[in-house]
Image (spheres, rainbow, N blue to C red):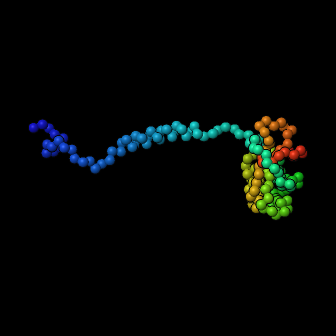
């Protein structure tokens, strides 16, 4: 009698109740390698220069409220310098306690991003949630150009 694979000499194979996971593991390892190679390529490590905007200008309100942060990190509401302790009170006065009024934030190009965020947090703490950032219009603006709200036209005499 010839040798068989199963005891009892039958050529019929029995049913297997185990799942072969080797192909699944192979596919998972290939995907893992693909994602490990692709993940570093998806990060952006490019310098940005945010103050210039190419957004289409929109009409400006009649009496906009500008909050300006100068290069020395001093804060102005309109043209008046304001201390951090009096900021909330002065913002209320400038907007006549109308918390639905949009506030335009201008910051010098050299001001760190964290300081602009701190200024926006101060605005939020004072109850002003409608904030518009101001930037230079156009792609290549000369240094003597005037600043304008990203969504508003430029008027002479306004600078960052």
Figure quadrant of residue 126: bottom right
Is residue 109 visible from the viewing direction of this image? no
**Residue name at image x 19 percent, y 44 percent:** 12
**Residue name at image x 83 percent, y 54 percent:** 61
Of the pair 28 and 156, the residue shown nearer to us: 156
Residue 151 rendering spot, x and y as whole percentages: 78, 48
Of the pair 5 and 75, the residue shown nearer to us: 5
Q: Image height check: is 139 above or below 113?
A: above
Residue 50 rendering spot, x and y as whole percentages: 74, 42
Question: Which residue extends farthest right?
Answer: 157
Pick the quarter of the image with the C terminus: top right
Pick the quarter of the image with the N terminus: top left
Residue 79 rendering spot, x and y as whole percentages: 88, 52
Horizontal relation, residue 127 to residue 25: left or right: right
How many numbered marks have been drawn onto this rendered protein structure? 0
Is residue 82 visible from the viewing direction of this image? yes
Horizontal relation, residue 38 to residue 86: left or right: left
**Residue name at image x 79 percent, y 48 percent:** 58
**Residue name at image x 89 percent, y 44 percent:** 156
Question: Which residue extends farthest left?
Answer: 1
Q: Image height check: is 47 above or below 75?
A: above
Question: Which residue extends farthest bottom?
Answer: 97
Residue 102 rendering spot, x and y as whole percentages: 79, 56
Figure quadrant of residue 30: top left
């Amino acid at each position: 009698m010839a040798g068989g694979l199963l005891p009892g000499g039958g050529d019929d194979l029995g049913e297997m109740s185990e799942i072969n996971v080797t192909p699944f593991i192979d596919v998972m390892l290939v995907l893992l390698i693909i994602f490990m190679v692709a993940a570093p390529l998806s990060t952006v490590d490019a310098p940005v220069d945010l103050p210039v905007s190419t957004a289409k200008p929109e009409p400006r309100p009649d009496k906009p409220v500008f909050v300006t942060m100068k290069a020395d990190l001093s804060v102005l509401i309109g043209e008046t310098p304001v201390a951090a302790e009096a900021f909330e009170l002065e913002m209320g006065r400038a907007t006549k306690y109308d918390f639905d009024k949009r506030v335009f934030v201008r910051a010098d190009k050299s001001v760190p991003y964290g300081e602009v965020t701190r200024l926006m947090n101060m605005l939020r703490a004072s109850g002003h949630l409608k904030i518009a950032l101001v930037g230079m219009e156009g792609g290549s603006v000369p240094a003597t150009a005037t600043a304008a709200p990203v969504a508003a036209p430029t008027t002479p005499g306004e600078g960052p």
